[in-house]
Amino acid sequence: MAVLITGGAGYIGSHTCIELLNVGYEIIVVDNFSNSKPEALKRVSELTRKYFKTYCLDLQNREGLEKIFTDNKIEAVIHLAGLKAVGESVHFPLKYYENNINSTVTLCEVMKKFEVKNLVFSSSATVYGATETVPISENTPLGATNPYGRTKQMIEGILEDLYESDHNWSIALLRYFNPVGAHVSGRIGEDPSGVPNNLMPYISQVAVGKLETLKVFGDNYSTVDGTGVRDYIHVVDLAKGHVKALEKMLISKGVESYNLGTGQGYSVLEVIAAFEKASGKTISYSIVERRPGDVGICYADASKAKKELGWVTCKGLDEMCQDSWRWQQNNPHGYNVETKLLIRS
């Protein structure tokens, strides 16, 4: 029996593949490679010394998805596929609603047809919106403020309705905070298309010389140094959270949401200082006006995941920066290589 991973070639997906393979799961990857590269999966196979099937497929292709379920004995699904850039979602909302929601509905319909009812869903802390109350628990009211976050919130509602219609489903909603870092090998990491939207890859590209300077949005928040504070979580810790969630889903029924964060916040300037220490580089930055909708402080209450999943984070900010820098140094242009990988379509 195998675990199907949608979006398995992406940043979080590739690290999750490694962790699943390392503890003995058989995996099958489905990815349309719209914002990921086959090279990531090649490296996953090299690092784990394990082979797995990979399909190039858009999840809205029902016929193709049904064939994958017909040809393989699938026990559970980890659903990571989806468009994920907040800024882009504001400019192209219909693209995000169509892709993220339709693909999830199609996936669930196919899962239902083949009696596969164990699902781990990649959600986001963006479902909470602009809340000033910290730490943020799973009971914090939801209120996404952008199309990307709203697709995640809507999908959570769809999956809750699905369980209410059939109590044989077992569903985990994983609300990520701010994933950063890379695999310790320096072979797997974050490879954003174009200018990075997130802080750590932007800092990394400034350090390596790809970008000139970092814009820090606001220095007058009520924080330790005036800059925004966020909960940064190492992507390997996050990937291990998926393994723990999967283990619980396989032995239980219901739908539960879990925050995956460290429970500790770091300011932008603290992250810059830690990265300078890790890289030995000076990070050029300038202070600019706040972005509309940004809050000063945001970090998780992750006690539910600790209690119910037995999951805790192990890697701190220094290690996040060291691993990010190792990845960036070793791959200044990301996965910019031609890859020959056996991909089914």
Image: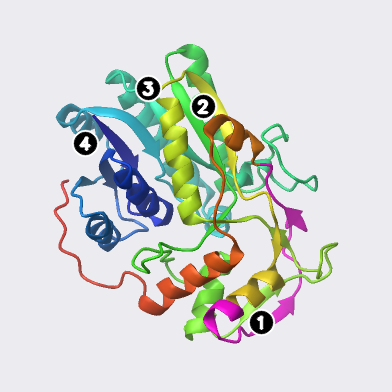
Q: Which residues are magenta?
A: 276-301
- Label 4 Cα crowd, 10 Å radius (few <14 / some 14-19 / many 20+): some
What's under tag 2, amino acid-wise?
A: Ile
Q: Is residue 139 magenta?
A: no
Residue 292 is left or right of residue 103, and the answer is: right
Badge 1 amino acid: Tyr
What is the three-letter code of the residue carrying label 4? Gly
Identify the residue at image location x=81%, y=66%.
Answer: 224
Q: Nearer the viewer, mark 2 or mark 3?
A: 3
Q: Quadrant of residue 75?
A: top left
Of labels 4 and 3, earlier in sequence is 4
Disc number for residue 64 = 4
Q: Main secondary structure of the magenta part?
A: loop
The residue carrying mark 3 is: 117
Looking at the image, residue 138 sits to the left or right of residue 310; the answer is right
Residue located beneath label 1 in the image: 285
Q: Position of residue 56 (x, y in %)?
A: 23, 48
The first of marks 1 and 4 along the sequence is 4
Q: Quadrant of residue 29?
A: top left
Identify the residue under disc 2: 158
Q: CA distance from mark 1 to mark 2?
A: 42 Å
At a point 66% along the width and 77% down the height, the residue shown is: 273
